[in-house]
Amino acid sequence: MSRTEKAAPGCLGKVYLLGAGPGDPGLMTLKGKGLLECADVVIYDALVSPPILAMINPQAEKINAGKRMGRHSLLQAETTNLLITKARSHSVVVRLKGGDPFIFGRGGEEMVDLVAAGIPVEVVPGITSGIAASAYAGIPLTHRLYSSSVTFVTGHESAGKYKPHVNWQAIAHGSETIVIYMGIHNLPYIVEELNQAGLDLETPIALVRWGTRPEQEELIGTLATINQQVAETGFSAPAIAVIGSVVNMHSILSGCRPV
């Protein structure tokens, strides 16, 4: 049961920016689960899995603020304004995000706006998909023989619409392992950029879809083959991409996936 349905008159509630993890409910933190069980309002994203939504206090108000390619339930400014409004009338407001709020989750943007509005706010980290999905696919992001560094980068940039912010030239040579979030839609552009930057087309790449969920699937190839493989199989988002020699470990370790 919720601790209180309404904030006391003249008092502000608190907003928790909570990371739900990548989907497996077993990866939700104990602190996160406790917050969902006592929340008055939960504003959640599209990629939060049903088992995690089932943890929410039955009496809580639940609002879908999810964003998927071309389909926005709420605009970002509307979501932030909603958080502020709810915190002025309810004690425990949870902004439930897939993965981790501060890893390509706009948690930093929302937190800045909440602080500017004078709303008490706390971030509760979650396990990000770049780490968890790779692990469930049997791909260690670091390995003493293959990789001593990792780069996390967003692939959600529209080529031709504006000047890209990602420096793919630097990314290509910056570390042995590259993990790309939200990059399936722009994968041909990304592969071309990495190749132009000097990354060998025989470099292994893994795409991991619905990471840590029962429906998880992987597509393994090289930079030279992956675009054709995606076209032939109809592989689609949501997925992460892992690029580097560590992908070769998939054939050895993928049979050890958690259950």
Image (cartoon, rainbow, N blue to C red):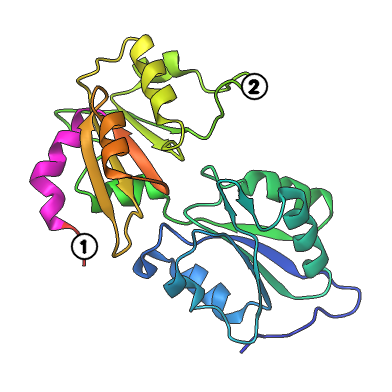
Residue 197 visible (yes or no): no
Question: On the image, numbered disc 1 is attached to which residue?
Answer: 258
* Residue at (57% x, 60% y) in the render: 45
Which quarter shows the C terminus?
bottom left
In the image, 197 versus 89, the foreground residue is 197
Which amino acid, by three-letter code, is at mark 1? Pro
Q: Quadrant of residue 58?
A: bottom right
Please tell me whether residue 199 belongs to the stretch shown in magenta: no
Outermost bottom residue: 1
- Residue nearest the observer in this picture, 152 or 183: 183
Q: Position of residue 232 (x, y in %)?
A: 27, 39
Residue at coordinates 81% horizontally, 78% vertically from top-left? 7
- Horizontal placement of 160 versus 40: left or right? left
Q: Which residue is mark 2?
A: 162
Instruction: Inspect the magenta stretch and tell me whether residue 255 lies in it.
Output: yes
Dot 2 lies on which element? loop
Question: Is 257 in front, or is 8?
Answer: 257
Residue range corresponding to the magenta coloring: 244-256
Residue 42 in picture, x, y percent from top left: 64, 71
Q: Which amino acid type is shown beneath numbered disc 2?
A: Tyr
In this rendering, the answer to whether 43 lies above or below 127 is: below
Q: Position of residue 93 (x, y in %)?
A: 69, 69
Q: Mark 1 packing: few (<14 Cα in 10 Å), some, or many (20+)?
A: few
Q: Residue at x 8, y 44 (%)?
A: 252
In this view, 20 is above or below 106: below
> Which mark is drawn over residue 61?
none
Give the left or right position of residue 20, taking residue 79 as reference: left
Majority secondary structure of magenta residues:
helix
